[in-house]
Image (cartoon, grey):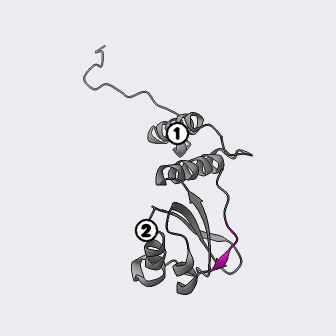
Amino acid sequence: MVKFDRTKKFTKTNIQKLPDDKAVIYKIKNASGNNLYTGIAGRGRVVERLLEHKNIKKEVIPGGTHIQIAQVKTKEIAEKDEVGKKIKRILKLKKTPKLDDTVDALAVAIAHTLSNGAHTNKPYQKPVKSGNKKKD
């Protein structure tokens, strides 16, 4: 599991001071400390990506006043960590699954379940084949 640095004010000065030598997972929070947005930035793109959230109108996170980052070795590790957290939230688990294979298997199972309409609370209905009706 990734450990986050302490929260800093989301200012251009603080963004410029962030390390850019590794990929990061970042959280943009409001004044109350609630997470508004979680993102991933690859190595060498951390400062640029966060400045996009500060300056580019379509990328701005409304109410974002603070930032928190966690450095990781690669962007792939950051993505795995985020998938694990989403699985924990969806399945209401107490802890994030630790093994990558477990996270992958649960992600596939959830995606399969959602693609079959299980999230609609409707019972599964076997597809009806057309043209095979028996005549009385």
Residue 80 spot, x, y in % from top left: 53, 47
Total number of numbered discs in the rendering:
2
Q: Which mark is residue 45?
A: 2
Q: What residue is rendered at 25% in x and 23% in y? A: 131
User: CA separation, marks 1 and 2?
Assistant: 39 Å
Mark 2 element type: loop
Is residue 127 rendered to the left or right of residue 130? Answer: right
Badge 1 amino acid: Ala
Sequence-first tag of 1 and 2: 2
| Main secondary structure along the magenta-highlighted residues | loop
Is residue 75 rendered to the left or right of residue 135? Answer: right
- Residue 55 vertical placement versus 70 (above, below): below
Q: Which mark is residue 118?
A: 1
Q: What residue is rendered at 52% in x and 85% in y? A: 12
Badge 2 amino acid: Arg
The quadrant holding residue 36 is: bottom right
Residue 5 spot, x, y in % from top left: 67, 67
Q: Quadrant of the C terminus?
A: top left
The quadrant holding residue 2 is: bottom right
- Residue 77 vertical placement versus 37 (above, below): above
Please state which of residues 26 and 127 is positioned toward the viewer in this rendering. Answer: 26
- Magenta segment: 5-9
